[in-house]
Image: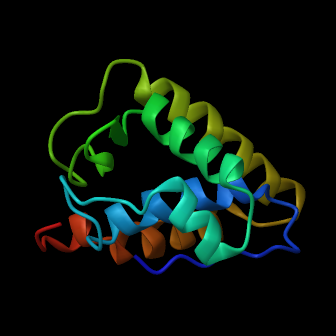
Amino acid sequence: MLLTIDLDSEVPIYQQIRDRVVEAIADGDLAEGSALPSTRQLAADLSINFHTVNKAYDLLRRQGVIRINRKSGAVVRRDAGSGPPEAGFADEWQARLRTLLAEAAVHGVNTDEAMLRCEEVLSSFAVKKGTPA
C-alpha cells in the first residue's frame, strides 16, 4: 500500500492515514481481507511515531473499516459498496458532510460547483465505476 502524507498539513497525521486508507478502499486498491502494514512498519516507512499510526488504525477500527487481530494484524473489514451501511453511519456521515459543504459555502463555492465536484469525486471511485473493489 502506497500511502502519502503531508507533514506540513493542518490535518493531523493520524487523520491523513485514516483518510488515505478509506480512499484506497473506495478506489479498489484495498479489498476485504487485505492486510495493512503493522503500526511499527508503517510508522518506520513514514518516519513517524508508531502511536500516531496506532491512533489512525484505532479510528478505522471504531468506524468499522478494519478489524484488528493479534495474529493477523490490521485487515480491511469490507469492500467498498459491499452492502448497506451500518446503523448510524449515514447520519454521522451527513454531519461531517454538512461541515465540508459549510466550508465550501463560506469560501464562495456555489451549489452547482459543489455538486459538480461531488459528482467528480464519486465517479472516481471503483465502487461507482462498477469495477470490483
For this view, does 111 lie left or right of residue 82?
right
Closest to the observer, 52 or 132: 52
What residue appears at the point 37 percent right and 42 percent down from the top-left corner? 65
The total number of labels drawn is 0
Q: Could you tell me residue 32's position as x and y percent?
A: 19, 53
Colour option used:
rainbow
Describe residue 38's horizontal placement relative to residue 77 as left or right: right
Q: Identify the residue shown where x is 45% and y is 76%.
A: 120
Q: Quadrant of residue 19?
A: bottom right
Give 105 or 130, whichever is nearer the viewer: 130
- Quadrant in the rendering for residue 95: top right
Name the one closer to the observer, 118 or 8.
8
> In the image, is 52 to the left or to the right of 107?
left
Image quarter hosting the C terminus: bottom left
| Vertical relation: 65 (above or below) 132 | above
Instruction: Write down the quadrant of residue 17 in the picture.
Output: bottom right
Quadrant of the frame with the N terminus: bottom left
How far across and down, in percent of the image, does residue 69 sit?
A: 31, 36
The residue lying toward the viewer, choosing from 64 and 51, is 51
Name the residue at 35% across, 43% down.
Answer: 66
Q: Is residue 77 above or below residue 112?
A: above
- Measured as percent of width and height from the top left, residue 111 is found at 65, 60
Query: Residue lying furthest top in this view?
Result: 87
Residue 100 at x, y percent in the picture: 70, 50
Residue at left offset 33%, top offset 36%: 70
Specify whether 28 is left or right of 102: left
